[in-house]
Image (tube, rainbow, N blue to C red):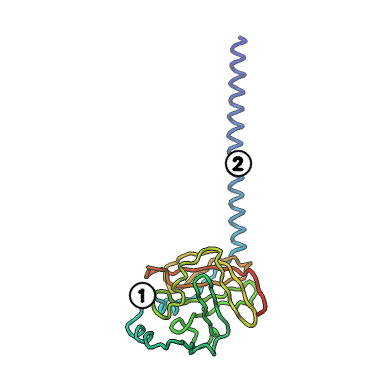
Amino acid sequence: MQNVHTKKTLVFLGVCIFTFGIILLLSNYFNEKVDNAYSYMNNLLLNRNETFDMQEEVDSISDSTSSFQEQQEQKKEPEVYVDPYEKYYIGSLSIPKINLQKGFVSVDSKYNTVSKNIQVVKGSNYPDVDKGNFIIAAHSGTSYLAYFKNLYKLTNGDKAYVDYNGKRYTYSIVNIYEQEKTGKIVIYRNGEKTCLTLVTCTKNSKTKQTVYILELENVENI
């Protein structure tokens, strides 16, 4: 009888330990789900997804080689190049890593187009807008208008500088991603940050475009 009682006790203890283990596992599982749900909602609150009409830019930005006419025009350029739009510039973009230095005109200017300059996308904000997003599009490829042809060499942490209205804005790349060309561009960024976004065709692709998200690090007088 004592052996039977001992066996029942052991079985009971075993069932209790097994049940406790199941409860502990379920508790950890649900806690993890709760944490994930909280993180997801927190990201929704902090991050702002913005959609901009890029039909004009998408139609005109090309990753193809320059046309024969463009090549001829390029050959005719004088040794000392004088930018015909320089007097219209209200600011400039520079990225030292790829030796890029180019001015930009007002968003409403007739020269604000990728067929002439780097283009300020309509609906974006100028750099002095707190938590705003300054968006610039330009050609890639091999055309002499391909101001963004070397953007593909950039990685997270690389710097870009915008000179505007007497101040220099320093930005750092925090995200790079590709999207299909659909006539619109969706920008994923932290809505609590002031940002610069660069858009161009993806290297060696005729159907995709690459988006570079940069966040403001510093502002200084120039």
Please provide percent x and percent y for residue 15.
59, 26
Please provide percent x and percent y for residue 26.
58, 39
Residue that badge 2 annotates: 28
Q: Based on the displayed image, in which of its 4 quarters is residue 88 positioned?
A: bottom right
| Image quadrant where one finds the C terminus | bottom right
Residue that badge 1 annotates: 64
Q: Based on the displayed image, in which of its 4 quarters is residue 178 positioned?
A: bottom left
Please provide percent x and percent y for residue 171.
59, 70
Please provide percent x and percent y for residue 140.
42, 74
Q: Secondary structure at mark 2?
A: helix
- Horizontal arrangement in the rendering, residue 64 relative to residue 55 (left or right): left
Q: Which residue appears farthest toward the front when viewing the image?
A: 79
> Which residue is drawn at the image coordinates 37% and 85% (left, top)?
75
Looking at the image, is 19 positioned above or below residue 127? above
Is 167 in front, or is 23?
Answer: 167
Check disc 1 and give the amino acid type.
Ser
Q: Residues within 10 Å of mark 2 (few under 14, many from 20)?
A: few
Looking at the image, is 54 positioned above or below residue 109? above
Figure label count: 2
Q: Which residue appears farthest toward the right when viewing the image?
A: 221
> Which residue is drawn at the image coordinates 47% and 67% (left, top)?
153
Whichever of labels 2 and 1 marks the residue nearer the N terminus, that label is: 2
> CA separation, marks 2 and 1?
54 Å
Front label number (2 vs 1): 1
- Horizontal arrangement in the rendering, residue 76 relative to residue 92 (left or right): left
Q: Residues within 10 Å of mark 1 (few under 14, many from 20)?
A: some
> Which residue is drawn at the image coordinates 55% and 77% (left, top)?
93
